[in-house]
Amino acid sequence: MSEAAVDEVSVLSSIYCGEGEFQLLQQSAQDGLMVQINRSVEGVDVKLLFHLHLRYPSCPPGISVSSSVLSRTQCHDIRQKLLDQAAALPPEPMVHQLVEWLQCVVTESFTGGEEEEGGEMKEAEQWTAALSLDHIRSPNRYISLLERWTQQLQLSGRLLLGQSILVILQGARSNIKEFCRLLRTVKVDVDSSGKKCKERMMKVLTESPTSSFSGHEYGSQKIQGFVVKNYKSLPELTAAFQEINMTGLYQQIRPSLRDSTAVTLPPPK
């Protein structure tokens, strides 16, 4: 088993040190480590079992979920979401992040069935969002993660690199929100001292149903793929928005950009 996995288990035992919170069930040179973490979320007791295989954290952990309150279907749904989240994370110790994310998952399991038909319509509706990133010091790692998340979450968009760093996303609103959550919780970059850090300075400049923007320009052309573009001047930035028929979006976020002298685009046709 890896040294990283053994160290992580030691840290986990210190974090979840309440009575009955943490238990090391197995430590084997053949099968790896197995730990159980019990948490109470929204008044619901949830038991998480993590199997850290010999190749962990190069591969995600095995996960099982059980609860005396949640139904078997809800436990299965929570397990699948945790597995999907683990697959989206970089190959680093991740058990603590997964346990912390349990709060969101359990809350969704209680509220997910309330919208029924209307919720299905909203989920199918395309949303467009514009995000602002503070910095990208480790571009290879950072951009690779952004590309992976857009593929996994079935999002399309643009990453515009220049004086302002902008991410334009299109897709299901829940998937855009998950993309934002990943940005804030995964160590995607390095700080000024070279240590891995999360994107805590990310800002959502705007998000709305694609059909709600004036001029209907967003409905006329869906963004294809996820493309990275560099720009060196404001004309190049405005051209990037014109290329994807999103001049209205540019006008909306222009006051938030770092350079307040940004030019005004002609109104959408």
Image (spheres, helix red, strand yellow):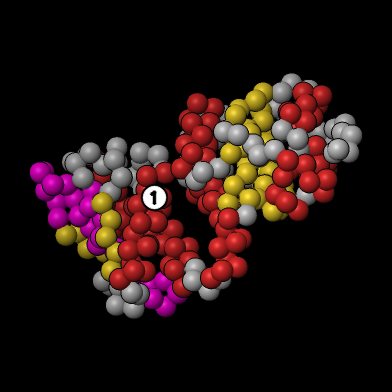
The x and y percentages for residue 58 are 29, 37
Image vertical order of residue 6 relative to residue 96, above or below = above
What residue is drawn where x is 23% and y is 48%? 52
Find out whether residue 49 is within the magenta segment.
Answer: yes
Q: Quadrant of residue 46?
A: bottom left
What residue is drawn where x is 53% and y is 70%? 116
Quadrant location, the N terminus: top left
> For this view, does 120 lie left or right of residue 110?
right
> For this view, does 116 lie left or right of residue 263?
left
The x and y percentages for residue 222 are 65, 39
Magenta stretch: give its range.
Answer: 26-52
The x and y percentages for residue 5 are 26, 45
> For this view, does 251 lie left or right of residue 34?
right
The kind of residue tagged 1 is Asp
**Front-lying residue, 80 or 219:** 219
Using a 10 Å C-alpha cutoff, classify the residue at mark 1 as few (fewer than 14 neighbours), some (14 to 19) or many (20 or more). Answer: few
Magenta residues, dominant SS class: strand
Q: Is residue 212 something that shows in the picture? A: yes
Q: Which residue is mark 1?
A: 84
Image vertical order of residue 76 relative to residue 237, above or below = below
**Front-lying residue, 208 or 86:** 208
> For this view, does 197 lie left or right of residue 67?
right
What residue is drawn where x is 37% and y is 62%? 78
SS of the residue at dot 1?
Answer: helix
Image vertical order of residue 71 relative to residue 221, above or below = below
The x and y percentages for residue 50 are 26, 55
Q: Is residue 103 something that shows in the picture? A: no
Residue most toward the top? 232
